[in-house]
Each structure stands twice: as structure tokens, then as C-alpha cells.
Image (cartoon, helix red, strand yellow):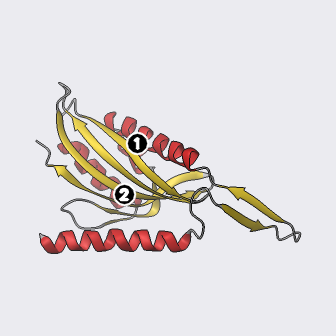
């Protein structure tokens, strides 16, 4: 068990390190793009509040799909080459495998259970974002039956945010 936790920590650190290298400017700093048709440099600024709002919108839509038990919509949040690092499970590679994993999770979940995702922090640049958040599941009476935390790495592809890496684990085991 200790080795699994060390592996998860190492994986999360590696993902963060790779993300930090990929985004040369932190959120809120200026980034520059050179227009290949001219020598003019275009300067843009990533708005951290807007970035957090965009990622929270993704998580809210995911919660809605999760609560509706809409497996196809849930899987659509992931890139084809995404990797999910689930708690107490082997690595899940690719959207098709993630969809199968989501289907298994939905099949085991009791009716009336709702899930909410709360974005705590987001940092990144125009095309990449790392999110840290918490998850809460409640039964049909509103009693919390699960609490956990997660980290997701998002990439903007064709103008749409898709999750490329996802890791989460328990605070409290589901009852």
C-alpha cells in the first residue's frame, strides 16, 4: 500500500513537472506569439479567474453527466489519449478504456447518489491548465457518503478543453 501511494505521488509530481515545463509563463503573465506572416509580436494575457471559471464549467458539466448516469457524455470530457490514475486501480489508458471504467463505476453506484466537483485551484496558460479539486458524493437523503480530492491536466484542443491526465484518491471511503 505504501508503494502504491509513493507511485501516485511520483506520478503526480512528474505530471506537474512536465506541465510546468510545457507552460513557460504562469497564469496572468504575458505570452507572446510571433505571426509567421510578419515580424509583429502579438501579446496576450491569461486571466486566472477566467481560466478557473472555464475549468469549473467543465466540472459542473461532468457532475451533471455523472448524476444523469450519462456514460458517453462523461467519456467525452477526455482526450482520446488521456490517462486516468484511479484510486486502488491500475492505470487506465485511452478514452475507450476510461469509458469502460466509468461504465463499471456507474453500474456499481446506488441510485439517487449525486456527485459534486469543486475546483479549488487552477493554474496554467492559454492551452494547458492544471486543476486541483475536491469531490463529494451524497446519498439520496443528502448525507455525505464519500469525499476525495483530484488533480486534472486539461489541454485545449480545437477550442475545447479536454482532460489529458486525471488522478484522484479518497479522503473518506465510500459507505
Q: Residue furthest top?
A: 141
Q: Quick check: marks 1 and 2 in contact, CB under 8 Å?
A: no
According to the picture, the residue beneath numbered tag 2 turns out to be: 151
The residue sitting at 83% across, 71% down in the picture is 36
* Real-space Cα separation, disc 1 to disc 2, in angstroms: 15 Å
Q: How many marks?
A: 2
> Residue 97: x and y, percent?
33, 60
Residue neighbourhood size for the residue with mark 1, other residues' Cα within 10 Å, grouped as few (<14), some (14–19), many (≥20): many
Q: Is residue 27 left or right of residue 30?
A: left
> Residue 80: x and y, percent?
46, 61
Answer with the quarter of the image where residue 126 lies. Answer: bottom right
Q: Nearer the viewer, residue 137 or 79?
A: 137
- For label 1, the SS is helix
Closer to the chain start, of discs 1 and 2, is: 1
Q: In the rendered image, which quarter contains the N terminus?
A: bottom left
Q: Nearer the viewer, residue 156 or 15?
A: 15
Answer with the quarter of the image where residue 45 lies. Answer: bottom right
The residue sitting at 53% across, 52% down in the picture is 161
Q: Nearer the viewer, residue 103 or 55?
A: 55
According to the picture, the residue beneath numbered tag 1 turns out to be: 62
Mark number displayed over residue 105: none
Question: Is residue 109 in sight in this rendering?
Answer: no
Q: Is residue 113 left or right of residue 37?
A: left
Q: In the rendered image, which quarter contains the C terminus?
A: top left
Q: Is residue 26 left or right of residue 64?
A: right
> Residue 157: x and y, percent?
58, 58
Q: Nearer the viewer, residue 8 or 139?
A: 8
> Residue 88: x and y, percent?
18, 62
Q: Is residue 131 above or below residue 63?
A: below
Amino acid at each position: 500500500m505504501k508503494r502504491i501511494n509513493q507511485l501516485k505521488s511520483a506520478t503526480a509530481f512528474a505530471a506537474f513537472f512536465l506541465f510546468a515545463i510545457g507552460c513557460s509563463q504562469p497564469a496572468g503573465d504575458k505570452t507572446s506569439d510571433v505571426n509567421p506572416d510578419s515580424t509583429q509580436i502579438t501579446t496576450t494575457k491569461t486571466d486566472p479567474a477566467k481560466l478557473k471559471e472555464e475549468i469549473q464549467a467543465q466540472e459542473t458539466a461532468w457532475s451533471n453527466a455523472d448524476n444523469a448516469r450519462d456514460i458517453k457524455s462523461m467519456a467525452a470530457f477526455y482526450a482520446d489519449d488521456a490517462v486516468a490514475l484511479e484510486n486502488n486501480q491500475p492505470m487506465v489508458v485511452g478514452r475507450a478504456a476510461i469509458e469502460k471504467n466509468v461504465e463499471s463505476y456507474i453500474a456499481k453506484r446506488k441510485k439517487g447518489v449525486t456527485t459534486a466537483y469543486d475546483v479549488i485551484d487552477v493554474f496554467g496558460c492559454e492551452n494547458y491548465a492544471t486543476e486541483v479539486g475536491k469531490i463529494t458524493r451524497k446519498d439520496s437523503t443528502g448525507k455525505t457518503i464519500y469525499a476525495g480530492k483530484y488533480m486534472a491536466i486539461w489541454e485545449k484542443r480545437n477550442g475545447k478543453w479536454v482532460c489529458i491526465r486525471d488522478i484522484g484518491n479518497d479522503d473518506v471511503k465510500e459507505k
